[in-house]
Image: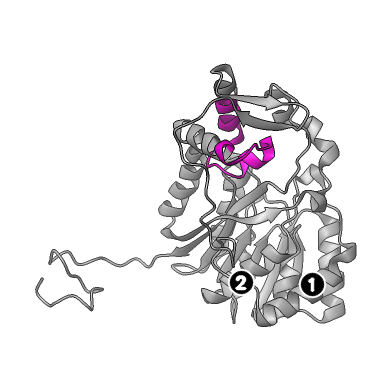
Amino acid sequence: MERTEIQILRALKESPKSFWELVTLQDSTLSVIVVTIKSLMDGGRIHFDSSTKTFQLLRNEKYHPRMDLRCKSCNGKGVIVDGIFHKTLQQFTSMLARRPAPDPNYNQGLISFPDLALKASFMYERGDLEDRAILFIGDDDLFSLYLGMLGMGQRILVLDIDKQVLRFVEEKAGELGLNVETMEFDLNRSLPHHLRHAFDVFISEPPEGIKGMLTFLKRGIKSLAEEEGTGYIGITRVESSLPKWYEVQTILTRNRLVITDVLRNFSLYPEGEGEWEDLYKDYPITGEIPIDVGPPNIDWYSSCLIRFEAVAKTSISRSHFYGDRDTWVTLKGL
């Protein structure tokens, strides 16, 4: 909470901020943010201006005003959309003008089109697209169609419980002749035997609830080829605490999977895309915030992209302090 306090205070020292803007500038869950804001208000350090719907400092704080030090070209994401990825994004955006609306009964939210293209760019860079068999555990974002349009994957299969998502994928894949297959599937069931250890890559944006998150993850892990394969999942910080992240990390370690990349706040969920404005009154957060902070004034909800990879069962030589069989630019004998 102390770190969250510092992040909030330095953000407000830069300028007054809405609740939703503060959420994007810190590293904690919504519950911790709300408790911290309450504490700062009770301590007379910040106050809320109901006319502007912004929080402001009540006194000078010792912290430096917040500085945005992320790369301005890629917004801190590390990749850009260029070449075939940009061309495909334009076609993809046009094609999905009439895509199915997200279904709140399945806890669906939609990642922005540009961020889907960025995810594909990152996967390409890591060698996880070309000639790969790829499994989607849920696909309300319709990312499978974007990858199918790139034409790099060997095989793409979508598992989803939502019939309207599957119908749309089937329709567009048929129209464009894409190698994208679909299968209606309830993840509460075990993965069918013919799908176990059958894929090089699996992709999922699991629910944030720990039971659903681990179920999606376990099904994806089971789909990967034995002792090899790569997984991509999205997890937030605003709805997933570090103990929850630890549970994910524990399962990965238990299955000999190692995290190779964590790209913070990589995938943005635009407010306009989800059309969730009328649902905010039904979210628990509405009853937890002691003041009327107003509806979101920015796109604030995003997930971190996590990539992990299988580790072969091999031993590591420990005969030398500085060197082992991997250290090819270390003097022999050290």
Residue at the limit of the structure toward the front, as seen here? 60
CA separation, marks 1 and 2?
A: 17 Å
Residue that mark 2 sits on: 80
Q: Is mark 1 on a helix, strand or loop?
A: helix
Look at the picture and state if 123 lies above or below 212. Answer: below
Local packing at callout 2 (Cα closer than 10 Å; few below 14, some 14-19, many 20+) is some
Given the current orientation, which residue lies at the most extreme right position? 98
Between circles 1 and 2, the one closer to the viewer is: 2
**Residue 243 spot, x, y in % from top left:** 48, 38
Q: Where is residue 193 in the image (x, y as percent from the top left)?
A: 61, 63
Numbered marks: total: 2
Q: Quadrant of residue 140?
A: bottom right
Instruction: Report the side of 310 relative to 284 (left or right).
Output: left
- The residue positioned 59% from the left and 81% from the top of the image is 130
- The vertical placement of 184 against 173, above or below, is above
Give the labeled residue for mark 1: 92
Give amino acid for label 1: Phe
- Seen in the image, is 311 located left or right of residue 124? left
Q: What type is the residue that disc 2 sits on?
A: Ile
Over which residues does the magenta segment extend? 12-37
Where does the C terminus fall, quadrant-wise?
Answer: bottom left
Residue 96 found in image quarter:
bottom right
Q: What element carries label 2?
A: loop
Q: Main secondary structure of the magenta part?
A: helix
From where the camera sits, is residue 123 visible? yes
Q: Could you say where residue 233 lies in the image, as x and y percent from the top left?
A: 58, 57
Q: Which residue is at 72% across, 49% downward?
A: 299
Q: Earlier in the sequence, mark 1 or mark 2?
A: 2
Q: Which of 184 and 299 is in front in this view?
A: 299
What scheme was used to colour the molecule? one colour
Q: Is residue 111 above or below residue 147?
A: above
